[in-house]
Image (tube, rainbow, N blue to C red):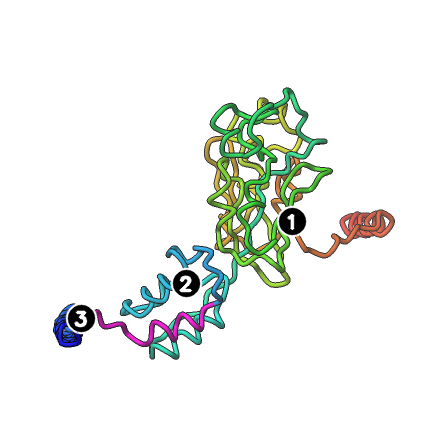
Amino acid sequence: MSTTILLTIISLSAIGSIAAIILYFVAQKFKVFEDPRIGMVEEALPAANCGGCGYPGCRGFAEALVRADDISPLFCPVGGNDVMTTVAKILGKEVEAKEPLVAVIRCSGSFAKRPRTNEYDGATTCIISSNLYSGDTGCQYGCLGMGDCVTVCKFDAIYMDKETGLPVVIDDKCTACGACVKACPNIIIELRKKNKKDRKIFVSCVNKDKGGIAKKSCEVACIGCSKCVKVCPYEAITLENFLAYIDPNKCKLCRKCVEECPTNAILEINFPPRKQKDESIEGTEQVKSSEKENE
């Protein structure tokens, strides 16, 4: 009896040893070498896993960075230039600093400016609402107001204003990950340059209807009058499909277009108040001018 047990133990041990040896050689044959720099780069990343870099999580982005010969086209919007500089040092590569971006809401059609014409009774998500009908106002292009952009933001950088019915971006929290941009079915959210002192000028409208129709549905709609295009000294404004657009790379923030817009569709953000001209001083200057002409 004891001999049988002993033989069983020896047999099982031998089989186990042989299996271990086979598994060892198989593992050596098919083992995948992983560059240790991938782990180092991943640790340097912010671990937000937001997808703003265009890859499925920080791990995927780290692998892409290690594989790339030139990492300049790659960028982590959450970590920004500081993180990319650290990554470049780890990989021994060069990277150019990029201007920070921030999300802007290109719709000013609040409850007061864009009257509601009907009431939606369905699933309270923008994506479903946009597939079922064109919105509860006369403008089919504007914000649907159901907060899909708020739901997808992992940084609490956007919220819905109950008074206006529009989303509001908290610039200091926005990482420009682009999640809200992708979530908006009407594409009213755009990533634009975060200029000095976070100053921005942009057309807060995406309505492509003709002027009269657009103005009827929203008081602050762009009517495609082209006045802003004509007054811009930097050729930063284009007009297409009755809608003006300001190129953030060409715009010099001169604000001439803002004063020219008849519907206040162009917003100027974080600028100091404009200086009001003193009518008495202006009148005196006109008198002096006329006196000189008479002399």
N-terminal of the pair, mark 1 or mark 2, is: 2
Residue 165, quarter of picture: top right
Task: State which region is magenta.
Answer: 31-45
Task: Find numbered disc 2 in the image and state the secondary structure of the residue it sits on.
Answer: helix
Query: How many numbered marks does the figure carry?
Result: 3
Please tell me which residue is depicted at 77% across the width and 53% down the height of the picture: 275
> Of the residues shown, which amino acid type is indicated by label 1?
Glu
Residue labelled with disc 3: 27
Instruction: Decide which of 94, 166 is in the foreground and name it.
Output: 166
Q: Main secondary structure of the magenta part?
A: helix
Residue closest to the far top = 118
| Left or right: where 206 falls relative to 284 | left
> Of the residues shown, which amino acid type is indicated by label 2?
Cys
Please tell me which residue is depicted at 55% across the width and 47% down the height of the picture: 232
Q: Position of residue 61 (x, y in %)?
A: 37, 63
| Left or right: where 96 falls relative to 16 | right
Task: Find numbered disc 1 in the image and state the secondary structure of the residue it sits on.
Answer: strand
Instruction: Decide which of 106, 68 is in the foreground and name it.
Output: 68
Residue labelled with disc 1: 268
Q: Which mark is residue 58?
A: 2
Residue 182 part of the magenta-drawn span = no
> Of the residues shown, which amino acid type is indicated by label 3?
Ala
N-terminal of the pair, mark 3 or mark 1, is: 3
| Left or right: where 289 falls relative to 103 | right
Mark 2–mark 3 contact, CB under 8 Å?
no
| Left or right: where 229 falls relative to 164 | left
Residue 28 visible, this angle: yes
Residue 58, quarter of picture: bottom left
